[in-house]
Amino acid sequence: MVEVSNSHSAVFDRTCELSCWSPPSNPETSSSDKMDPVLELWIDDNAVPIKVRLAGLLDAHTGAAVRSVIGELLAEGHRDFALEIDGLEQPDASGFSSLVAIQRQIKSVEGSLRWSPGLFAYASVTG
């Protein structure tokens, strides 16, 4: 189960942050209400293109949270994005699928997406 803590306003008029949390890896040694961060997402919509920076673990669950936020931005009319993924842990298949889904989501509304150089480092490891 992933809990999403979203500190942005409905209108993305400032830099905002979204954190996805998971239960502690060892509940017996952690306090019952403490959760470990899994993915952090920073958005700067004062920039053109919109800067989206990801750090942590991108998988099927956290990818869905990111796509939800991207969907809100697209619904508000934003179309140009720069995705910085240098802070991601090495993604597994579901992480790569999430990146592809984000790209398709933006392209489906004729938006543009620029990737950070970190994407090519991931591709060289898997390719």
Image (cartoon, rainbow, N blue to C red):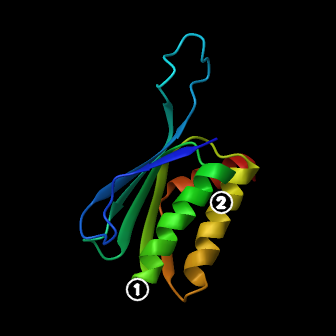
Which residue corresponds to the image point at 42% horizontal and 74% vertical from the top-left?
73
Residue 34: horizontal and vertical position, in percent? 46, 25
Q: Is residue 37 visible?
A: yes
Which residue is identified by label 1? Answer: 77
Residue 112 place in picture, x, y as percent: 49, 81
Q: What residue is at 56 percent from the left and 25 percent from the top?
A: 24
Q: Residue furthest top?
A: 29
Of tags 2 and 1, the one toward the viewer is 1
Neighbour tally class for label 2: few under 14, some 14-19, many 20 plus, Cα within 10 Å: many
Q: Is residue 79 left or right of residue 14?
A: right
Residue 114 in view in this figure:
no
Q: CA distance from mark 2 to mark 1?
A: 22 Å
Residue receiving disc 2: 98
Q: From the viewer's perspective, tell me whether residue 113 is left or right of residue 51.
A: right
Classed neighbour count for the residue bearing mark 1: other residues with Cα under 10 Å, few (<14), some (14–19), many (≥20): few
Q: Helix or strand or loop: what does disc 1 sit on?
A: loop
User: What's the residue type where badge 1 is placed?
Assistant: Gly
Count of marks placed on residues: 2
Q: Position of residue 108 (x, y in %)?
A: 61, 85
Residue at 71% x, 46% y: name it.
Answer: 92
